Amino acid sequence: MIPRYARPEMTAIWEPESRYGVWLEIETLAMEAMAELGTIPKSAAAEYRAKGKFDVARIDEIEREVKHDVIAFLTSVAEHVGPESRFAHQGMTSSDVLDTCLAVQLARASDLLITGCERVMAALNKRAVEFKMTPTIGRSHGIHAEPTTFGLKLAGHYAEFARNLARLKAARAEIATCAISGAVGTFAQIDPRVEAYVAAKLGLTVEPVSTQVIPRDRHAAFFAALGVVAAGVERLATEIRHLQRTEVLEAEEYFEPGQKGSSAMPHKRNPVLTENLCGLARLVRSAVIPAMENVALWHERDISHSSVERGIGPDATIHLDFALHRLAGVIEKLVVYPENMARNLALLGGLHNSQRVMLALTQAGVTREDAYRLVQRNAMAVWQSPPPRADTALIDKLRADKDITAKLDAKTLEACFDDAHHFARVDEIFARVFN
């Protein structure tokens, strides 16, 4: 994890102090449950709750000798609690602590990711409404197609992030499970009611069959969901990067006063934020394959997943959290140029209405194949003329084509070039998205 791309709220979840704090709470809650069941003295649980502390530096020192992080942790706490600490970790195994803690951390991380996603959606909602009826050219294969509106573009991204929000909530629910079942997950040395108690206190559900570890298909699904969200971030960032190109310039990132775009060229205003978002999305998605490969562990457990998760857990959540808030900021302050959208829309002399003319011809009795041929030969003449094409507009070519005018009268032909037709359903689409 690089601090440059991290927010303190998310980073704090993965700090050693936070992690060991969760471990201590798991151990303490387990002791309290055992005390209620009569497995250990109530005084021991009370003592552990009152005196339970740890020292990160001391844990590191002990681990260098024992080569086991949970044992090092328990030893550090025991040094603060005293003799009653012998009742800690009764019937438990390291995975009970590690996996349950990871579930808590990922659930907390999910809450922050959900907040970030909601901020992106709020920004998209506001700007989509603002530019709901602002005409712009739609592009397929990067080439002018038919008109849309800038608000409709943003509404599409809003709908995607609404799906992403649902994915994050589902991923949170799947990952938030507790396993305190002892060696190989049989509850041979610990009562299942201890697990249920700890789970309830931590806001988790119990893992039906833990086999000593929580099955890693849950984690695979979690990181896959993060990868999909990251892909949505990149899709929107890529759109903005294209729109900011000098030849397009329909929208651009806000350029701060005093900001510099290039060390060599003082005129530059580069889409650095959205380029950065595309890079962060790649980092988040890089966690997906390792998470998938963690699913197949040996028998009831091994720790081949552990080193992977110690990396991808913090990195993927921290990077996606940062990316969501950066993306929201880009959208909130995005500079939009409707006049450039109008200029680009007119760039090809009305070619974007070619389909309307073709359909009008079919309505007039011309076969679709012939209609396509008649419109295309005029469209290509316009396409091959130098821009701007105001003097070689498609409608003028069509008016001079006797095969066209034999089928379409002047009023019908002119109606094909009324761009308002393209926006007649915008309200209907908005109603589908923003309900």
Image: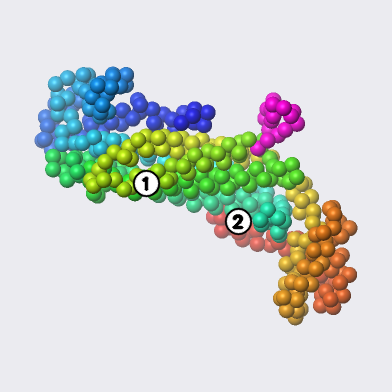
- Secondary structure, mark 1, is helix
Locate residue 72, reporting x and y percent: 25, 25
Assess disc 1: are there few (<14), some (14-19) or many (≥20) residues with their C-alpha within 10 Å of its C-alpha. some
Query: Residue at horizontal 22%, vertical 40%?
Result: 180
Quarter in which the C terminus is drawn: bottom right
- Image quarter for residue 73? top left
Query: Residue at horizontal 23%, vertical 42%?
Result: 212
- Image quarter for residue 327? top right
Q: Which mark is residue 79?
A: none
- Secondary structure, mark 2, is helix
Magenta stretch encompasses residue 311: no
User: What residue span does the magenta drawing correspond to?
Assistant: 255-271
Instruction: Give the residue type at disc 1.
Output: Glu
Instruction: Give the residue type at disc 2.
Output: Phe
- Image quarter for residue 328? top right
Q: Which mark is residue 293?
A: 1
Name above or below for residue 292 compared with residue 309.
Answer: below
* Residue 168 seen in the figure: no
Of residues 123 and 16, the one nearer the viewer is 16
Query: Residue at horizontal 85%, vertical 78%?
Result: 406
Instruction: Say whether residue 86 is left or right of residue 249.
Output: left
Instruction: Say whether residue 385 is left or right of residue 47.
Output: right
Locate residue 44, reporting x and y percent: 15, 26
Q: Which mark is residue 430?
A: 2
Name above or below for residue 37 compared with residue 17.
Answer: below
Locate residue 332, reporting x and y percent: 61, 39
Instruction: Say whether residue 224 is left or right of residue 89.
Output: right
